[in-house]
Image (spheres, rainbow, N blue to C red):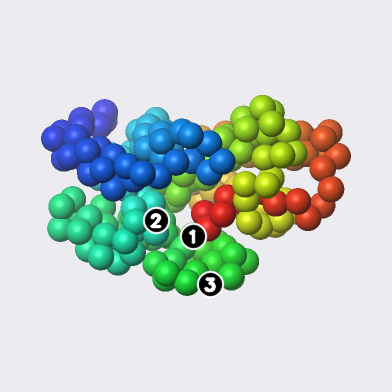
Amino acid sequence: MSTVLTRRYESALVYATQLHATQKRKGTEVPYISHLLAVSGLVLEGGGDEDEAIAGLLHDGPEDQGGEATLNQIRQLFGSRVGDIVAACSDTFETEKPSWRKRKEEYLKHLEDADDSVLLVSCADKLHNARSILDDFHQVGHRLWDRFNASRDETLWYYGALSRVFAARGPHDLAERLERILQELSAACVADNNPAGESTEEKDA
C-alpha cells in the first residue's frame, strides 16, 4: 500500500527546517536539512509510513537541538509514535555526552531489540551518513578525516557492526545498500593508504 503524506508531514518539514536552521553538515556549507530530507526520502523508499517519514525528518532534533524538551515538543506536535521512534534513534540526550565508544556500543545493543520502525529510520540515517562520507572522501581524500572525532578504524568498526545488525534484522534493501557503500569506503581507504588512527566519525554524531 502506498504512503500518502498529509499536512502533518508538511508541518514536520517546516518544524525540522526551523529547528536546524543554523546547522550545517560537518565541514561543509550544506544546510543540515539536506540530511534530514535524504533520510526521510530513504524511509519512504524503504516502504515507510507517514509517521516513520516524519521521524526521519526529526530524528536528530532532540540530540542536536534541545534534548528531552525538544523530544517532548515532538510528541505533542506529531504524536507518541513519532516521538518513540525519534527517541529510539538517539544515542544520548545528555549535554556532556558519554564517550563515543560507550554510546555506540549501547546503541548497537539497543538495535538488537528495536522494532521495525526504529530499524528503518536508523538504517536510512546510517546509509545517508555513510554515503556522504564516501562521496566526500572521493572529493577531498584523507583530509576528510580531520572533520571527525573517532578514529578511522573505530568508525569502520561501528558502521560494519551496524550493517550486520540491519542485514540480520532489516530493512534488508537499505541494509544491502549500506553494505555496498561500506565495501567501497573500505576499499577507498586501503587504496589511499590512510594511516590508522586518522579521524572519520563526525564530531558528536
Neighbourhood count class around disc 3 (C-alpha, 10 Å): few under 14, some 14–19, many 20 upward: few
Neighbourhood count class around disc 1 (C-alpha, 10 Å): few under 14, some 14–19, many 20 upward: some
Task: State the residue at coordinates (32%, 42%).
Answer: 21
Mark 3 vs mark 1, foreground winner is 3
Marks 3 and 2, how far apart at CA: 15 Å
Neighbourhood count class around disc 2 (C-alpha, 10 Å): few under 14, some 14–19, many 20 upward: some
Determine if residue 197 is in view: yes
Q: Which is nearer the eye, 109 or 8?
A: 8
The first of marks 1 and 2 along the sequence is 2
* Residue type, numbered disc 1: Leu
Q: Does dot 2 land on a helix, a strand or a loop? A: helix
Q: Which residue is mark 2?
A: 64
Marks 1 and 2, how far apart at CA: 20 Å
Q: Does dot 1 land on a helix, a strand or a loop? A: helix
Q: Which is nearer the eye, 56 or 175?
A: 56
Determine if residue 172 is in view: no
| Residue 36, horizontal then vertical, whole percent | 38, 39
Q: Which mark is residue 111?
A: 1
Left or right of residue 4: residue 38:
right
Q: Which mark is residue 98?
A: 3
Marks 3 and 1, how far apart at CA: 18 Å
Q: Which is nearer the eye, 96 or 60?
A: 96
The first of marks 3 and 2 along the sequence is 2
* Residue type, numbered disc 3: Pro
Left or right of residue 131: residue 113:
left
- Number of residue marks: 3
